[in-house]
Amino acid sequence: MNALTVSMTGITEDLNTPATSVGTAITAGTFAMAAFILLGAKIGAKFGSRLVFQIAVLVHGLSMAAVALSQSPAMLFIAQAMSGAVVALIAPALTVFIASNFQGTQRAKAIGYLAAAIPAAGVLALLIAGTFASTIGWRYSFVLIAGLGLINLLLSLRLKKVAPNAQLRIDWMGATLAAVSIILLSFGFSGLNTWGVFLATPNAPFEILGVSPAPILIILGIIVGQLFFTWLRRGRGKNTPRIFDLRVLATSSELAVTACMGIMLFVATAANFLIPLYIQVVQGRSSLETSIAVIPYTLSIFVASSFVAVLYKKFPPRQLARFGFVVVAAALILLAFTIRNEWEHIFVIIGLITLGLGQGSIVALVFNTLLSAAPKELAGDVGAWRGLVHNVSGSVGIAVATGFAVGLLGTLIATSAAEHTEIPSSLISQVNFDEANFVTNSQLEGVLEQTDATPAQVDAAIDINEDARLRALNISLLALAGVAMLGIVPAGRMPGRRADEVDLLNAPVEVLESGNIPKDE
């Protein structure tokens, strides 16, 4: 994802597409992963996590090669979707590897390192992809990722084998319901911007009584999702295979942890897309400059993910989560009020670092809490559930934030254009504000060249667009801060126990399965 975001300018120019199309490609990959991750966990358990991991790594490398060869936004979209689908096999396997090789505090540290590995790799991706995009071209970043896939395949030979469960029966009905639900949600949320939030736009593939297909698909996705959980509940106690074990969500505490995870990843992924969008489109910075600007944020995620485990014995999870959401909200508010055209502003840097510290702490905390409360044999289900929530929340975050920011942008441009006497109504009538998008000044000039705008009117339009882009992103960040504050509510229902009082990591499986777990404080 980092390689795509910092390559935004090169991709938009090379494929002649708006910057928000990059967000669509990202959501394609993350939604595809979410759609198949529950099935991926069971496939790993049935055929052996290491073998499945190796096959997935190889296919992922091929999909990255396809991204590098993309000649259209559609090809980029398909390649990213293929990449996400095979990552659905990789993510549960990583959790199984940790659960199989580590116990107690070592497992908690390993989880922190796994969470930290993502931002650590992100720093390298930002530097390398930014350098490539600014010099030899954005495609070479994905050629490199494809090559790394082969290296991962060789390194996986050193992993400890996890015995396959050949007798495991796969719940194909549950897998189908989960995939259909997420695919419907994927197309629904991804289409909010282009198809219309409520009323259908001319770009919508179909309409029902003038209503956009986007909200219809979202509602259908939610309905199928409810059928999925109904199917799971009907299988409990019947000794029939189910694609996901509901013991992972056995209590209100686990549900609260899931809610915290979803809210945090919604906010974090949306912010992680909007910030590079701001740097490259609003400021006109290069991919390399974008990478350097985002590195403090990414490093702070790494630091927080690595060291939050030391706080487990001093503070209960609910207290850490509450404080984390307050920190995230404060950071987003600071960014919303201080972002200007001078990226080096000290408060912007402080805001990014603070955002990363809060985000990294919460993500590592909720994953550790969820895995600690589940029996060891459900590690694959925990990893799959974490991956599903991660990708659905992240994809929805990008889609909703993009739709909100673009819709706000169109409104601000239309209002400002009507208030500027330099721009006559005859010119306004030639521009479709319903199709407004985040474009660079040069792209806007290209659009205005197709009208009868004079040079003075073009300059005025560029000024309006620059101001509207900045204000739209400021307001979007402020809205994300409000969403982060909502996370305080479920955080209060997270476990109140401390790690030194109840060590569920070492609790016997029989105790965990019986449900006789000590209650929260």
Image (spheres, rainbow, N blue to C red):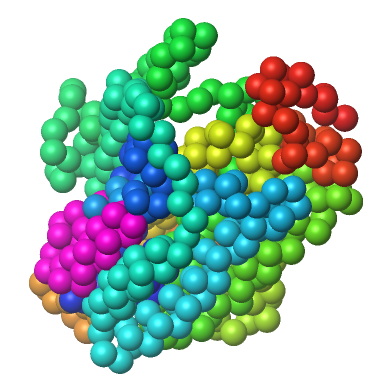
Q: Residue 39: which quarter of the image?
A: top left
Residue extent of the magenta highlight: 54-81
Q: Is residue 361 visible?
A: no
Q: Nearer the viewer, residue 329 or 209?
A: 329
Q: Residue 23: which quarter of the image?
A: bottom left
Q: Is residue 55 magenta?
A: yes
Q: Please tell me which residue is depicted at 37% across the width and 36% down the height of the picture.
A: 46
* Residue 409 higher or lower than 339, as above or below: above
Q: Give the x, y percent position of residue 369.
A: 69, 41
* Residue 121 higher or lower than 425, as above or below: below
Please identify the quadrant where the N terminus is shown: bottom left
> Across the whole image, how many numbered discs are drawn on residues?
0
Q: Give the x, y percent position of residue 301.
A: 62, 65
Q: Please tell me which residue is depicted at 14% across the width and 76% down the height of the picture.
A: 449
Please identify the quadrant where the C terminus is shown: top right
Q: Give the x, y percent position of residue 508.
A: 72, 30
Q: Nearer the viewer, residue 495 or 186?
A: 495
Please tell me whether the stretch drawn in magenta is mainly helix, strand or loop.
Answer: helix
Q: Is residue 407 magenta?
A: no
Residue 74 shown left or right of residue 151 in the figure = left
Q: Nearer the viewer, residue 2 or 232?
A: 232
Q: Please tell me which residue is depicted at 27% across the width and 43% down the height of the picture.
A: 191
Q: Residue 230: which quarter of the image?
A: top left
Q: Is residue 398 visible?
A: yes
Q: Give the x, y percent position of residue 370.
A: 64, 38
Q: Residue furthest bottom?
A: 135
Q: Please tell me which residue is depicted at 21% across the width and 64% down the height of the picture.
A: 62
